[in-house]
């Protein structure tokens, strides 16, 4: 059984590597074109994400998908229990969105080229100590994207480390502060199952079922302290997780 899991895992990573190569080739070939091809890159990535989940043997159950019937919320807030989460969001969300991810993904030249072409936004540039988001650094790009009408997908946990027994790490306040500052609504989502299919910092892949529960768009009162608004968001996502 362990050998079969290993073979399956190697097949998945081979397909993942090939996907990255094909996307890199596509983006390199089209880089000189004077057109905005972000939507094309998104749709191609979405297509490959479906194939990768199929190869991984993952079944996805979605609850509350009606809340994603249109781009009513400018921010989608999700938890991040496993590395395969990224593929699930590409498959489930029906409209183009932009990931907000740690700036460390932008340090390797090839990866930086890929994620920039796909519209990812770096979170916590080097000058922003301890990922305290400022309006000058990452915050300016995030707020600018929202004002343009872009849909952002964010990870309020902002870290991998969890305390024993926790299903979500304590949320950072930057997500709530952005929502309060811009006045947009946020759509909370909670995913479970990816932590057993492909846990963080693990190599072996185990097929299984993933459940993604989507909540109704919510507003965060700008008069509330950011810490209390953050607690509201985390409670909403925890409620979805355990529903």
Image (cartoon, rainbow, N blue to C red):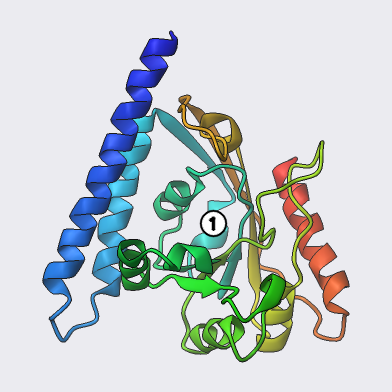
Q: Residue at x 37, y 38 (%)?
A: 53
Q: Quadrant of the N terminus?
A: top left
| Dot 1 alpha-carbon crowd within 10 angstroms: few under 14, some 14 to 19, many 20 or more | few
From the viewer's perspective, tell me whether residue 23 is left or right of residue 66. Answer: left
Q: Residue at x 82, y 72 (%)?
A: 229
**Residue situated in front as seen by the camera: 243 or 104:** 104
Residue 216 placement: quadrant: bottom right
**Residue situated in front as seen by the camera: 78 or 213:** 78
Q: Quadrant of the C terminus?
A: top right
Write down the residue under mark 1: 66
Indicate the position of residue 79 as horizontal and vertical percent values.
64, 52
Q: Residue furthest top?
A: 1
From the viewer's perspective, tell me whether residue 102 is left or right of residue 34. Answer: right
Indicate the position of residue 21 as horizontal and vertical percent values.
21, 52
Task: Answer above or below: position of 92 versus 228.
Answer: above
Residue 24 placement: quadrant: bottom left
Q: Residue at x 15, y 86 (%)?
A: 34
Task: Answer above or below: position of 134 versus 122.
Answer: below
**Residue situated in front as seen by the camera: 107 or 24:** 107
Residue 111 placement: quadrant: bottom left
Indicate the position of residue 212 as horizontal and vertical percent values.
57, 45
Tell me the element at label 1.
helix
Indicate the position of residue 204 as horizontal and vertical percent values.
46, 27
């Amino acid at each position: 059984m362990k050998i079969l899991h290993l073979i399956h895992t190697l097949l998945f990573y081979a397909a993942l590597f090939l996907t990255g190569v094909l996307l890199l080739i596509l983006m390199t070939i089209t880089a000189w074109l004077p057109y905005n091809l972000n939507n094309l890159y998104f749709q191609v990535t979405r297509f490959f994400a479906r194939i990768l989940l199929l190869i991984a043997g993952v079944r996805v159950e979605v609850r509350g998908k009606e809340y994603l019937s249109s781009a009513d919320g400018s921010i989608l807030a999700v938890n991040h229990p496993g590395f395969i989460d990224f593929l699930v969001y590409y498959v489930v969300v029906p409209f183009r969105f932009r990931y907000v991810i740690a700036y460390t993904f932008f340090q390797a030249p090839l990866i930086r080229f890929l994620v920039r072409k796909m519209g990812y936004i770096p979170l916590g540039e080097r000058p922003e100590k301890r990922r305290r988001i400022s309006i000058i650094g990452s915050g300016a790009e995030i707020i600018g994207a929202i004002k343009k009408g872009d849909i952002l997908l964010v990870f309020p946990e902002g870290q991998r480390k969890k305390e024993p027994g926790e299903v979500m790490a304590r949320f950072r306040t930057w997500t709530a502060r952005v929502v309060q500052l811009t006045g947009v609504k946020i759509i909370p989502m909670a995913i479970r199952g990816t932590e057993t299919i492909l846990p963080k910092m693990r190599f072996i892949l185990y097929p299984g079922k993933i459940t993604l529960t989507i909540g109704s768009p919510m507003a965060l009162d700008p008069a509330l302290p950011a810490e209390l608004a953050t607690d509201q968001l985390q409670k909403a996502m925890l409620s979805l997780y355990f529903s």
